[in-house]
Amino acid sequence: MIKRLTIISLIAIILVIVAYNTRFYYATLPIESVSKREVLQSINESSEPIVKIANEDGYDWFITRTDQGEYRETLKAMIGNHGWEFQTQDGSGYFFEKGDETLIVTTEMWTGEYVMVRVPEGWEE
C-alpha cells in the first residue's frame, strides 16, 4: 500500500513539474516560432513595457501587460516614436498614418494579464 502511494505521489509531482514548465494552462500563442515559456521569460526579464518576441509571417510580434488598459498608450507611443501618427481605433485595430501610408496594428488578449501586438514588418523604416 505504501509502495503504491509513493509511486502515485512521485508521478503526481512529475506531472506538476511538467505542467509548470510547459505552461500548458496558458492559452495557445498565435505564433509558432516561440514557446509560452520564452514569451513569459522575455516580458518578465525586460524593463520595457512592451517587448518584441518574434518576427513571423511578415509581422513583428510584441507582448505587453494589460495594466488595466494602459497598454494602449504604450502601443501608441512605441509606434509614434517611429514617425507614425495615431488616427483611430476600431475594435482591436489601431490605425496610424505616415505621409500617404497607412499602418494597421492589431492586438489580441492572450491571457487576462498579457496582450499580443501584431505589427506589419517594415513599420520601423
Image (tube, rainbow, N blue to C red):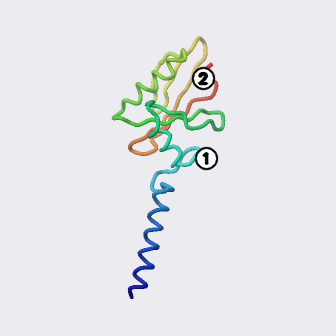
Q: Which mark is residue 52?
A: none
Q: Residues within 10 Å of mark 2 (few under 14, many from 20)?
A: some
Name the quarter where the N terminus is drawn.
bottom left
Q: Amino acid at mark 2?
A: Trp
The x, y position of residue 93, in whole percent, is 49, 30
The x, y position of residue 21, in whole percent, is 49, 56
Q: How many marks?
A: 2
Observer-nearest of 20 and 78: 20
Observer-nearest of 93 and 62: 62
Furthest-top residue in view?
Answer: 99
Whether residue 2 sits left or right of residue 79 in the image: it is: left
The x, y position of residue 14, in whole percent, is 47, 68
Say which element carries label 1. loop
Please, is residue 57 above or below residue 80 in the view?
below
Q: Residue at x 61, y 47 (%)?
A: 32
Q: Residue at x 46, y 44 (%)?
A: 110
Q: Quadrant of residue 99?
A: top right
Q: CA distance from mark 2 to mark 1?
A: 22 Å
Whether residue 107 sits left or right of residue 67 in the image: it is: right
* Residue topped by disc 1: 32
